[in-house]
Structure formats: C-alpha cells, structure tokens
Image (cartoon, rainbow, N blue to C red):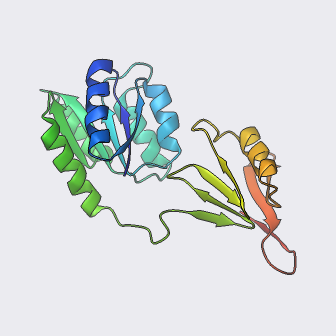
C-alpha cells in the first residue's frame, strides 16, 4: 500500500514514516502544502495522511482541490486537539477520517487497515494501457514491448513523459491540443487507426 504523508513537523513525520515502512507501507513524505498538492494530484496513492496546518497551502485547501479534480483517495486528516471546526469542515469536504495529534502509532495503523478494507481493489492493480504502452501508477513504471522506464515522481510534466515514450520506442505519442490540454495518440489495433484520449 502506498501512502502520501503531508506533514510539516519533520521529526514527527520521519518517525511515523519509518514506522509505516516497517509495517510494509511505501511512504512518500512531503513537508509543504503546495508540494503535497502536486504529489496528491498524481493520484497514485492508496491513502493520504494530511496535516491541516501546513506552510504555503493548508490541508483543507489541498483536500478541496483534489476532490474537485475527482481524486477519491481516502484521506486521514491530522489535526491539533481542539480544532473541532476544522474536523467538521474536513469531513464535509470529503475526508474519510481524522486523527488528533499527538496520536499513538498503533491507532494510526488500525485506521489505515480499516480504510484499506473499505477501498475497492482494482483487478489490474490500477495499470493503465493505451496503444503499445502500459503504465503502473503504483510503481511509476512505463513499459512498451520489452522496454521499461522508471519515472521519477516529478515526471508528470509533459516534456519528461514525451522523452520517456521515446526511450521505450513507443508508437504512442502525446499531442498538444491548444486551449484544451493534451491527448494520447497512437496505433492500438492491426489497422493502424489512431485512437485519442
């Protein structure tokens, strides 16, 4: 299970991350709200641990933005005691649970297990396929035929992805649609027709 932890209290965050790793979780640790939003928007996590009070962007704003983008990753808010209004707001915005600080790691692990039981499991582990490429968001691995490339976390930027597609000799390309965004284009059947997303 892959966990994103966005927490600016570095000593506490590192200690919790180490405990989670010993419990066989994969943990990405971020100390800044704006960077935490970038990570969360990648939509590759099974659970997000999200502090409310963060530098550059607070946790409630992050939660609001990811839910607006349709990301339904379960979120546990980490709150200071006595922040009842923030807890209520967070739950209304789409948080799945909250945990007041300081907390016992045994309770955190139990809450993670509970959320894991509630989350539907994808048959293909979330692997995305288009044309001649497959991408695993959990391992950030791009494959084409026998070639494989491991993406860095920040390579959700288009220019990096184009280079990675070239590196694995993919027929699939990323095209820019002015004023609208991007689309995948490539041969995905025997007749060589282009498919667009």
- The image quadrant of residue 58 is top left
Which residue is depicted at the point 63% across and 43% down?
151
- Residue 116: x and y in percent read 28, 57
Which residue is depicted at the point 50% across and 69% down?
124
Residue 179, visible in the rendered structure: no
Q: Is residue 126 above or below residue 24?
A: below
- Residue 22: x and y in percent read 28, 41
Q: Is residue 134 above or below residue 43?
A: below
- Residue 45: x and y in percent read 43, 48
Q: Would residue 10 appear left or right of 143 to someone viewing this image? A: left
- The image quadrant of residue 6 is top left
User: Which one is in front, 85 or 145?
Assistant: 145
Q: Would residue 43 appear left or right of 85 to someone viewing this image? A: right
Which residue is depicted at the point 35% across and 66% down?
120
- Residue 38: x and y in percent read 52, 35
User: Which one is in front, 189 or 167?
Assistant: 167
- Report how many numbered discs are placed on residues in the image: 0
Q: Would residue 71 appear left or right of 143 to someone viewing this image? A: left
- The image quadrant of residue 132 is bottom right
User: Which one is in front, 91 or 141?
Assistant: 141
């Amino acid at each position: 299970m892959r966990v994103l932890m966005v927490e600016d209290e570095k000593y506490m965050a590192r200690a919790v991350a180490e405990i989670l790793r010993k419990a066989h979780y994969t943990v990405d640790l971020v100390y800044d709200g704006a960077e935490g939003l970038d990570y969360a928007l990648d939509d590759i996590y099974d659970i997000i641990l999200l502090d409310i009070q963060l530098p550059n962007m607070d946790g409630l704003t992050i939660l609001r933005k990811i839910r607006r983008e349709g990301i339904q990753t379960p979120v546990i808010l980490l709150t200071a005691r006595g922040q009842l209004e923030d807890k209520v707001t967070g739950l209304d915005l789409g948080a799945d649970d909250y945990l007041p600080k300081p907390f016992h790691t045994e309770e955190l692990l139990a809450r993670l297990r509970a959320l894991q039981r509630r989350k539907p499991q994808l048959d293909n582990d979330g692997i995305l396929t288009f044309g001649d490429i497959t991408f695993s968001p959990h391992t950030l691995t791009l494959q084409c035929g026998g070639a494989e490339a491991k993406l860095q976390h920040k390579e959700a930027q288009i220019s990096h992805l184009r280079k990675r597609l070239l590196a694995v000799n993919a027929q699939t390309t990323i095209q820019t649609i002015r004023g609208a965004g991007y689309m995948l284009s490539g041969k995905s059947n025997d007749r060589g027709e282009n498919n667009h997303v």
